[in-house]
Amino acid sequence: MTDRIGGLPDRIRVGIVGYGNLGRGVETSIGLNPDLELVGVFSRRDPASVETLRPETPVYALDDIASFADRVDVLVLCGGSKSDLPEQTPLLAKQFTVVDSFDTHAKVPEHFAAVDAAAQAGDNVAIISTGWDPGLFSLNRLFGEAILPQGETYTFWGRGLSQGHSDALRRIAGVAGAVQYTLPSETAIERVRAGENPELSTREKHVRECFVVLEDGADAEAIREEIVTMPDYFEPYDTNVHFISADELARDHAGMPHGGFVIRSGETSPGVSQTIEYRLALDSNPEFTSSVLVAYARAAARLAARGERGALTPFDVAPGLLSPKSPEQLRAELL
Amino acid sequence: MTDRIGGLPDRIRVGIVGYGNLGRGVETSIGLNPDLELVGVFSRRDPASVETLRPETPVYALDDIASFADRVDVLVLCGGSKSDLPEQTPLLAKQFTVVDSFDTHAKVPEHFAAVDAAAQAGDNVAIISTGWDPGLFSLNRLFGEAILPQGETYTFWGRGLSQGHSDALRRIAGVAGAVQYTLPSETAIERVRAGENPELSTREKHVRECFVVLEDGADAEAIREEIVTMPDYFEPYDTNVHFISADELARDHAGMPHGGFVIRSGETSPGVSQTIEYRLALDSNPEFTSSVLVAYARAAARLAARGERGALTPFDVAPGLLSPKSPEQLRAELL
């Protein structure tokens, strides 16, 4: 399985599509990975209006991206899952090897099918739903279940700000700004830790708290109703909506912490209990998600270079491909 | 990436080589996985003398294993890393697809090379060093480093009984029975949790405690010296050796708990700290290791059926291959 990665330049050339928190995180992360080279940011905005964290980062119009086909090994797609990625990932997978962090769990099969068709047609690789949930948390759910088939898996999030859900709030007409925090239910966590293997409904496990700034003249009650009934995002949870001022939003809600854990608890024989626990404690959710995207960008470029085609998820990617180290180094240093 | 697993019977046919704690654990684990079928146990002992946990499990002489080439899809090798696996894995990889849990970290490159040559020659797949360390812990070291390139990784074990190290003790001439517990240093853990990113020597992180029953007439001091100077296993640690009676061993040291954690702590930008923590709390180390071996046996049989060849480690195996579920199911249920 060694020496199969050929056809790549010395440094993998990466493009960033979309320049919000995630795009900025990818820009920073590429700077920490000497085997990667940033070709530039591709934006729907006027390139002259985009201020990058690093002044040397080139910014191009997204409309011109086709002309970069020979200058980019992999694109990291940094749009939102609600409306950007369902369009952009299939569109760009026809022309480029891409990675995204599509995070609407219920729509993964649909997104996968659309991206797979595009990537197959374009002879490219597309890794979707990297990031940490879906992504790293999904991997831990899979490992837990495969190793301890007789048991239960629990995922808890927070307390943390959810990018995808905040994004969904901000897209509602009449909303000027918003953040959403997810809180795990303390009661639920205690029952899991006590080894009760409880049946917990979605509603029992987490609460969603929304802090929303209204545009002038917006109808607060209509917006509250639109939020709490939004399918997949808010409808399955107890959701509290707080209306605050723009000043309060800027003052009290500037950080983007997150975290959570996946616990698999099971028995390998009667009375013999085994527990696997995976936890993330993140100062910045977008910077962490970006770091995961960048590791999967490396894997995507390598898979494309060795002739793989079509859509993949983290389930399909051998972990060694995420590391800049050679298989020999990995075995000697990390196994 | 779907529909690539062909050429396997409805149930994957598994053979167990070696019938100690690990072999018994594999026998039990196969019973929890309906897509796997146990062909039998292969032992160096007289088959009539081997009492299996399930009376219906057939036992065969290891010498006759060649005649099972068409009746076994994958062998799970359950010998010890000190002397069994370095011989058995290359030998059997010439004839069968195999998995082992070789756990002498320092000798992994050597073992990999020998197994790879044999598996390539025999046109088979061999996944080495599954289990949890090496294995699951190695994977978490790799993910941590790939995602947070600027940071430190810490692995702590215990308090737990180490199979490999107990096995090494038992092989010393004059030792009638023995167990070895690994204890993490509380001071070291506290420094890591406080975010100090300390430099810790092997000796500062863990202590090894050995409880040894001597054979009649054995020289206690010579055996103590042989233990504490044993390379890789005990020499790099502060090792305490306690001599106890056979009755004490049976009464106080029958359980086989273990566990530990891998922590990666790093910064994605100045002052922005991110922490990934992976923990195992195991009532039975061999039963858990066996469960990991069995999941990788499934992966090995699938990789062999799709035409892969040679030695692999968990770094080379796409996680989805560990699960009995189809890629479609995994995406819909776990992503």
Image (cartoon, coloured by chain):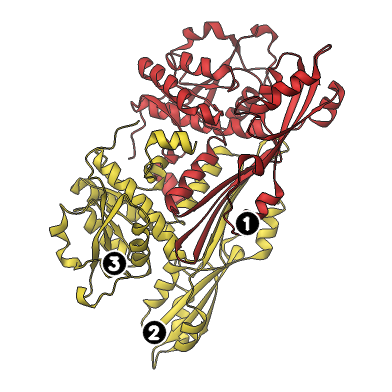
Chain colours: A yellow, B red
Q: Of callouts 3 and 2, which one flags the residue occurring earlier in the amino acid sequence?
A: 3
What amino acid is found at the position of numbered circle 2 in the picture? Ala
Cα–Cα gap, marks 1 and 3: 36 Å
SS class, disc 1: helix
Residue A254 appears in the figure: yes
Residue A199 appears in the figure: no
Position above or below: A199 against A63: above
Picture disc at residue A176: 2
Image-quadrant location for residue B201: top right
Q: Nearer the viewer, residue B275 or B271?
A: B271
Residue at 37%, 48% (x, y): give it.
A313
Image-quadrant location for residue B328: top left
Q: Position of residue A333 (x, y in %)?
A: 47, 37
Q: Nearer the viewer, residue A277 or B57?
A: A277
Q: Are marks 3 and 2 on the same chain?
A: yes
Cα–Cα gap, marks 3 and 2: 20 Å
Q: Residue furthest bottom?
A: A217
Tag 2, which chain?
A
Position above or below: A154 against A145: below
What amino acid is found at the position of numbered circle 1 in the picture? Arg
What amino acid is found at the position of numbered circle 3 in the picture? Gly
Residue at 28%, 75% (x, y): give it.
A51
Q: Nearer the viewer, residue A50 or A236?
A: A50
